């Protein structure tokens, strides 16, 4: 009988001050991993990689304890200081990449149903290189979080940023997808924008989003807003192009203003100096906007150049 080797799966968990949540999360993840390995769906060498993102509490000590209790099953890396979720995740994925067939990223707070891992592995084995975890509902989110998130998805779309709706960073990526990800050398990291650019065969797994199991959210509104703006400005030069468009629009409005000013002037109901001032203010205003827009076009080009993103990714060869 032909013996197939099962894939090594790495579960990457970014942790920032998660000592209270890890107590609940790790047993869950370990159980899922053992079950999958026992059933022969994944390799016995599959493991969990916790990334401590410069926590100030006992998170790292707990990770070390778990690593010695479950040798080979739990690994940890500690970042030298707090860099934020996206960077902690990237550090984990890039570390796992060297030693897995696919990596699944999941938050430390059990908000993303870990059972979806089973479905993700199934999709991976069926040929998907990227499997997105997508929230079925957002009932556990507050009305404000739900609607502000929706508004940002829409804004991002309008700005030409391709993201997967209601998908956070809960996803599986094959080693090949991770290799391609490693070529995106940009500093401003917005993984939700980069991953769809990778291409390859993708699929979706739906799950219900739960409440945080313990501890507090590390993403208050202010951080979320900054993150969303970062998402747009890391991918789109459109806001700069809009300056140019507005300049052209105002130039068109200038014609109407000019007619109004000239008619008023020749009818004689203007104080001296008003007409010339009005005409120059409007004309110069639009000229300045157009000039900024032109500079913006070049800055936009440079912005794309300095990212040194791969210009294409190869899917297949024969
Ligand atoms: N996180 C991190 N570094 C940070 C902030 C958060 O590694 O600076 C981790 C955190 O431990 C969690 C995940 O990122 O595993 C998502 O954070 P959180 O659950 O607080 O965000 P929310 O779900 O509330 O948006
Ligand atoms: Mg959370």
Image: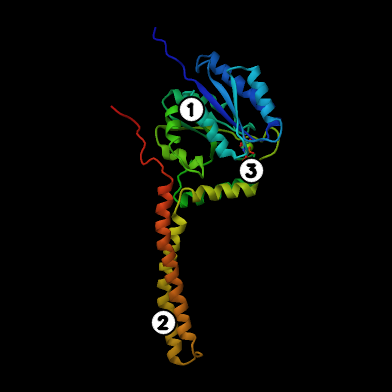
Whether residue 197 is visible to the viewer of this picture, yes or no, is yes
Circle number at residue 259: 2
Which residue is found at the position 45% from the left and 89% from the top?
Answer: 265
The location of residue 317, given as percent across then percent down, is 30, 29
The Cα atoms of the two marked residues, 3 and 1, are separated by: 27 Å
Q: How is the image coloured?
A: rainbow
Q: Secondary structure at mark 3?
A: loop
Quadrant containing the C terminus in the rendered view: top left
In the displayed structure, does residue 103 sit left or right of residue 255? right
Q: Secondary structure at mark 2?
A: helix
Q: Nearer the viewer, mark 3 or mark 1?
A: 1
Circle number at residue 212: none
Circle number at residue 219: 3
Which residue is found at the position 42% from the left and 40% from the top?
Answer: 197
Q: Residue furthest front?
A: 80
Which residue is found at the position 35% from the left and 32% from the top?
Answer: 315
Label 2 neighbour load within 10 Å: few <14, some 14-19, many 20+: few
The Cα atoms of the two marked residues, 1 and 2, are separated by: 66 Å
Label 3 neighbour load within 10 Å: few <14, some 14-19, many 20+: few
């Amino acid at each position: 009988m032909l013996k197939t080797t099962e894939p090594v799966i790495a579960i990457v968990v970014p942790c920032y001050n998660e000592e209270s949540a890890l107590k609940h999360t790790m047993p869950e993840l370990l159980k899922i991993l053992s079950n999958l390995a026992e059933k022969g769906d994944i390799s016995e060498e599959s493991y969990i990689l916790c990334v401590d993102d410069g926590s100030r509490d006992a998170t790292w000590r707990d990770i070390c304890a778990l690593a010695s209790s479950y040798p080979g099953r739990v690994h940890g890396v500690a970042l030298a200081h707090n860099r934020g979720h996206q960077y902690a995740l990237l550090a984990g994925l890039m570390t796992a990449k060297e030693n897995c067939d696919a990596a699944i990223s999941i938050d430390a707070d059990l908000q993303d149903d870990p059972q979806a891992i089973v479905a993700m592995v199934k999709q991976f084995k069926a040929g998907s290189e990227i499997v997105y975890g997508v929230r079925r509902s957002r009932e556990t989110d507050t009305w404000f979080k739900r609607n502000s998130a929706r508004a940002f998805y829409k804004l991002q779309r309008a700005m030409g940023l391709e993201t997967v709706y209601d998908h956070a960073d809960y996803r599986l990526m094959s080693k090949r997808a991770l290799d391609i990800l490693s070529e995106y050398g940009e500093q401003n990291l917005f993984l939700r924008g980069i991953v769809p650019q990778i291409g390859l065969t993708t699929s979706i797994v739906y799950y219900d989003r739960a409440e945080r199991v313990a501890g507090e959210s590390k993403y208050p509104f202010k951080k979320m807003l900054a993150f969303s703006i970062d998402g747009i400005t890391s991918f789109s030069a459109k806001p700069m192009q809009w300056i140019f468009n507005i300049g052209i629009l105002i130039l068109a409005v200038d014609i109407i203003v000019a007619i109004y000013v000239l008619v008023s002037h020749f009818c004689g109901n203007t104080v001296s100096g008003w007409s010339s001032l009005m005409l120059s203010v409007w004309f110069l205003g639009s000229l300045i906007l157009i000039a900024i827009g032109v500079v913006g076009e070049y800055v936009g080009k440079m912005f794309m150049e300095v990212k040194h993103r791969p210009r294409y990714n190869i899917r297949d060869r024969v």
